[in-house]
């Protein structure tokens, strides 16, 4: 039995930040440092190779404990973890993401009863050193496979507090859900979008928009 490990590329992840009203763009670099698959049982991939896969339930994983509700604790079929060093500063707000975790599950139900086959958790730290609160809202996530297939992930908004108070630091997880997710060993990139809003702005006004492109590499 051959165990497979996921490692991140040393290529820089590029973040393009567009500041509304001035047309200014800023480029920020971030690297995926390393990653791994935790595994206890065996699965055969499409290419015929056997890999160890994760076995357990979501409640056993601290990255997803917030999204477990009313006994909804699906079995984890496959798990991949990536450490990152992504960071971005927007005026007085410093935003860091240091880990991405993707899991395939047998069946996860959200609060509306909809079923999903995959989840992703990003561990973040956000420090607002300014004099006013800000709002930061994830809008979508896309997992891109080696063959170019794009798998869209919805934000689990019920578990996200978008208000970040002034002169405060907060860390936690932001979660995304995938209707279908069965080839995370073939993942090559994750794309994420977040919007930032200043206090007093209208809901549809975005003060800060950034796109994160995270290249991934599966190492055998």
Image (spheres, grey):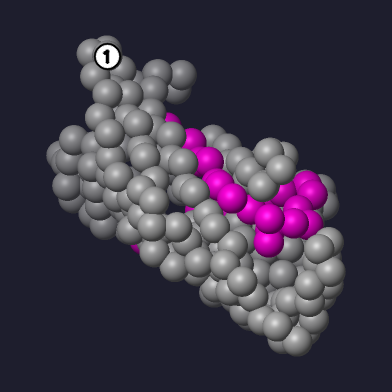
- Residue 98 lies, in percent from the top left, at 38, 61
Q: Left or right: where does residue 117 sit relative to residue 67?
A: right
SS majority, magenta: strand
Instruction: Assign the N terminus to one quadrant of the image.
Output: bottom right
Magenta stretch, residue numbers:
171-197
Crowding at label 1, few (<14), some or many (≥20) Cα neighbours within 10 Å?
A: few
Is there any visible trace of residue 153 in the rendered image?
Answer: no
Q: Residue at x 39, y 46 (%)?
A: 13
Reading the image, the residue beneath label 1 is: 23
Q: Left or right: where does residue 160 sit relative to residue 195?
A: right
Q: Residue at x 74, y 56 (%)?
A: 183
Q: Left or right: where does residue 202 sit relative to residue 1?
A: left
In the depicted structure, whether residue 160 falls above or below residue 148 = below
Q: Residue at x 71, y 43 (%)?
A: 147
- Residue 118 lies, in percent from the top left, at 72, 56
Q: Left or right: where does residue 184 sit relative to residue 21?
A: right
Q: Residue at x 30, y 45 (%)?
A: 29
- Residue 67 lies, in percent from the top left, at 63, 62
Q: Quadrant of residue 28?
A: top left
- Residue 61 lies, in percent from the top left, at 60, 76
Is there any visible trace of residue 127 in the rendered image?
Answer: yes
In the depicted structure, whether residue 16 falls above or below residue 55 = above
In the image shown, does 130 or 8 lie closer to the viewer?
8
In the depicted structure, whether residue 133 falls above or below residue 209 = below
In the image shown, does 91 or 192 lie closer to the viewer?
192
């Amino acid at each position: 039995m051959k165990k497979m490990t996921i490692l991140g590329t040393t290529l820089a992840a590029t973040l393009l930040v567009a500041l509304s009203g001035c047309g200014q763009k800023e480029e920020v670099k971030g690297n995926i440092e390393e990653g791994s698959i935790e595994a206890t049982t065996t699965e055969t991939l499409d290419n015929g190779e056997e890999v160890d896969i994760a076995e357990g339930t979501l409640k056993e994983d601290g990255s997803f404990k917030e999204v477990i509700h009313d006994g909804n604790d699906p079995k984890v079929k496959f798990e991949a973890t990536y450490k990152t060093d992504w960071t971005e500063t927007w005026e007085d707000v410093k935003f860091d993401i240091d880990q991405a975790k993707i899991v395939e599950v047998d069946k996860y139900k959200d609060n509306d009863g909809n079923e999903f086959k995959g989840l992703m958790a990003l561990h973040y730290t956000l420090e607002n050193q300014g004099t006013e609160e800000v709002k930061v809202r994830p809008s979508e996530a896309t997992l891109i496979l080696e063959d170019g297939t794009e798998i869209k992930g919805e934000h689990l908004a019920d578990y996200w507090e978008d208000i970040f108070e002034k002169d405060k630091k907060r860390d936690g997880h932001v979660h995304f859900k995938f209707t279908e997710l069965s080839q995370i060993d073939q993942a090559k990139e994750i794309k994420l979008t977040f919007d930032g809003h200043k206090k007093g702005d209208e809901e549809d006004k975005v003060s800060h928009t950034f796109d994160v492109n995270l290249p991934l590499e599966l190492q055998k």
